[in-house]
Image (cartoon, rainbow, N blue to C red):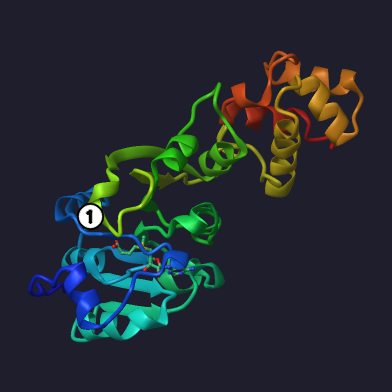
Amino acid sequence: MTNSAPKPPSIREILRAYDLDPKKSLGQNFLTDSAYLDRIVETADLTPQDAVLEVGPGLGALTARLADRAGHVVAVELDDRLIPVLRGMFGTREHVEIVHGDILALDPGAFMGSFYKVVANLPYYITNAVVRHLLEASPPPSLAVVMVQEEVAERICAEPGDMSILSVSVQFYAEPSIAFRVPASAFYPRPNVDSAVLRLESRLHPAVASVDGTAPAVDVKRFFTIVRVGFSQKRKQLRNSLSGGLHLPKETVGAALRAAGIEPSRRAQTLSLFEWARLYRALEHET
Ligand code: SAM
């Protein structure tokens, strides 16, 4: 059951009423433009059947909209000054839980149940760590709709030619896409950069395992060792960077690359996720 609440007061009004200053060190840039808040919630396709985890509810602007659409909302906020404000706003709404804590120290898979979504305007100082923490959770969210810096969103969604450890790591777990962009003017205080809302749809199986649908389990640590070594000397040809970093003869690495359908002179940033997957399989007995 969801109940509609009256429109919450503006961010500036709440800050004034509670005598609060936004904390830069916690990435507190509050989204004040209601059209963008509505679009974030629409992007998550919420229904009363959905359980939603919000990271960093701040002063509750997004939380209120999530509470109107979803059957259960868990909002995790680190700043102790904001907890009484949030409890005051949502105390009467039984399907909203305000948790005081650090998202990186909590296990979302443990308290959200088997099927949940994440919707958040992320604190930018820990974006990469939070995205990784969520995607590696067991179980991960089926869908994450998160606001991040525009440049980070673009790096995550990169295609072969511009790939990085970040894009491979996220694309390993999820299919990312940029839903829409948000100008710095939509926030208070105004950040130095523009933002984008990223839609991350978790893959049912990590991409490496789903290459032929029957592949055996993936040693995730080893997969990322290969990726990291490949990217460690980006200007080098893969045959050279991998043979040096994995302590394997160049001939062995060259043969594995060819078996994976990858020209050994290529560089790490040109490989697609699926080429990394094939390379991992081709090197499986060599590393
Ligand atoms: N959701 C609000 C909005 O959209 O206006 C606030 C978003 S603000 C960009 C990020 C929020 O994350 C802040 O409220 C900040 O205090 C909170 N935060 C920062 N680090 C956190 C952490 N490690 N765990 C949970 N919340 C955190």
| Residue 263 location, quadrant | top right
Residue at 9% across, 72% down: 4
Residue 215 spot, x, y in % from top left: 64, 37
- Say if 170 sits above or below 248 in the image: below
- Say if 217 sits above or below 86 in the image: above
Residue 45 shows up from this direction:
no
Amino acid type, label 1:
Val
Left or right of residue 48, residue 191 in this image? right
Is ligand 1 closer than 8 angstroms to the Cβ of mark 1?
A: no
- Say if 234 sits above or below 170 in the image: above
Residue 263 shows up from this direction:
yes
Residue at 30% across, 86% down: 84
Query: Which quarter of the rendering shows the C terminus?
Result: top right
Q: Nearer the viewer, residue 172 or 90?
A: 90
| Residue 270 location, quadrant | top right
Query: Which quarter of the rendering shows the N terminus?
Result: bottom left
Query: Could you classify mark 1 by the number of other residues whose Cα lies within 10 Å: few (under 14), some (14-19), or many (20 or more)?
Result: many
Left or right of residue 272, residue 40 in this image? left
Locate ligand 1 by image quadrant.
bottom left
Residue 231 spot, x, y in % from top left: 70, 33
Left or right of residue 252, residue 205 in this image? left
Q: Nearer the viewer, residue 22 or 124?
A: 22
Residue at 42% across, 40% down: 153
SS for callout 1? helix
Residue 67 spot, x, y in % from top left: 21, 69
| Residue 234 location, quadrant | top right
Q: What residue sits right under mark 1 in the picture? A: 41
Residue 201 spot, x, y in % from top left: 40, 45
